[in-house]
Amino acid sequence: MSDHDTATSSSKSLSTFVFGPPPEGNVPERISAAVEQQQNQSEILVGWIQLTLVVTLGTLYALSPKMSAAGAIQAVPVALGLYLLFTISRLVASYRIALPGWILMGSVIIDVTLLMTLIWSFHIQYDQPASFYLKAPTMLYVFIFIALRALRFDPRYILMAGGTAIVGWLALVLYVILSDPSDPMITRNYVEYLTSNSILIGAEVDKLISIAMVTVVLAVAISRGQRMMRRAAMDQVAARDLSRFVPQDVAQHITHAEESIKPGDGESKVATVLFTDIEGYSTLSEGMSPQLLVSTLNEYFGVADEIVQRHGGTISQYQGDAMLITFNTVQADEDHAANAIRTALDLREAFATRMFGEGTLMKTRCGINTGEMTVGAVGSDARLIFTVHGDEVNVAARLEQLNKEHGTYLMVSVQTRDAAGPEFSYRPVCEVVVRGRSTPTDVFTID
């Protein structure tokens, strides 16, 4: 590895340590747009807080005793009035448009500049030496102004506010020192500093360091939070998009799992499986173009999905025209067998006469079985599917195929009948020996 590569790697490691890991890959435009919209809303919040601050300052000034000499220039009300006018103007503008970055940067500078002007005006208002304003408690509002920029979740505005505050306060200190070259009013006596208009350079340096440290800490914190927010936003969008490719219940199970799901992770539970298949699908598909076939199937699956969700089922897999629907797998359902039968009956009724695409009838056959099966992830570390597997699943698939031999559209195993209860009218159809079993399984249909 070259020295350049080593330096680049070290720089990235340091950046990750300080600011946190960045989002993987480029942030999609839709996520950036959502973040920007939230930032624009934050700018409105900033405006209201600043309006509250200036009103509070004005109220405190109006209620406080006026110690200025008669006829003295009333600089404080003028400075407060200018800041109030600027704050209201920007708040109104933020409601009407998304303020561009250069305006926001400029407004940050103006905010801090107006605050520094207000502090500077105190020595005029009260007819005191310039050093008088360096001890004004209003200086603490500098930290509020810096912290306010954190609401926008962009460290640039924090750095701009802090940098402007440092330059502003340094200018105020230099103004005191240089305003009267014959008497800079500098002292090294802390008691004298507290009890007179003298200035202590160390105290002013402490203020500048405090402003710088608060600015840096807030900027780093917001940078870390910004990266975390973007990663979280990407994960949220990915989870929402994932739910379009896998069942929503499965997507939530994956995204809310305490640990990363690995191949073979699963649990054994009693559940019900419903297999569906379209009657004569091969013949139907031969007479359609690929585009028409896909659009017709999508319309068909849309109707089926609504029915399945209504009864608490999960479409675990699509296999061509077939669906593997499960109950009491991802989502707990004590009435899973009955809900599977209700789903099948509604599917049979919905598809008995409804036309899809360009007038295509897509009658659906169903096979249902209940029993103990494994629910979990199958595949490799690189690619997994969340499904059910086991002998009871194979029974359901075999029952769906039996519909062809008996001219029915719904086959139910004796286990499903017993679990569902007497709600339905069952009619015995046959007994079937499933591959791998020695004893036959009683099969029923529901008229």
Image (cartoon, rainbow, N blue to C red):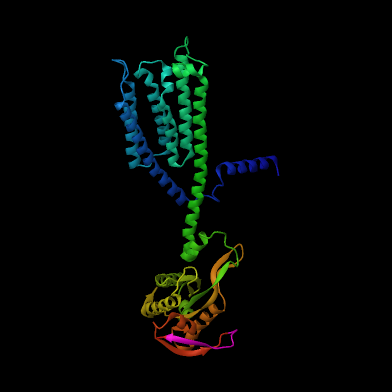
Seen in the picture, residue 405 relative to 37 is either above or below; the reply is below
Magenta stretch: residue 312 in it?
no
Quadrant in the picture for residue 383: bottom right
Question: Nearest the camera: 431 or 206?
Answer: 206
Q: Residue at x 50, y 88 (%)?
A: 442
Seen in the picture, residue 134 relative to 151 is either above or below; the reply is above
Is residue 287 at all visible to an observer of this figure? no
Question: Nearest the camera: 347 or 216?
Answer: 216
Q: Could you tell whether 47 is left or right of 416 in the image?
A: left
Is residue 249 at all visible to an observer of this figure? yes
**What residue range appears in magenta?**
435-445
Which residue ends up furthest to the right in the rendered image?
1
Q: Could you tell whether 108 is left or right of 187 in the image?
A: left
- Percent coordinates x, y for residue 223 in the rendering: 51, 42
Q: Residue at x 57, y 41 (%)?
A: 18
Rendered-image quadrant of the N terminus: top right
Quadrant in the picture for residue 130: top left
Q: Residue at x 47, y 36 (%)?
A: 158
Q: Residue at x 46, y 22 (%)?
A: 171
- Percent coordinates x, y for residue 374 in the rendering: 56, 72
- Percent coordinates x, y for residue 219 in the rendering: 50, 38
Seen in the picture, residue 370 relative to 33 is either above or below; the reply is below
Rendered-image quadrant of the C terminus: bottom left
Question: Nearest the camera: 136 or 157?
Answer: 136
Q: Could you tell whether 392 is left or right of 284 in the image?
A: right
Which residue ends up furthest to the top in the rendered image?
182
Question: Nearest the camera: 429 or 417?
Answer: 417
- Percent coordinates x, y for residue 338 in the rendering: 42, 78
Q: How many marks?
A: 0
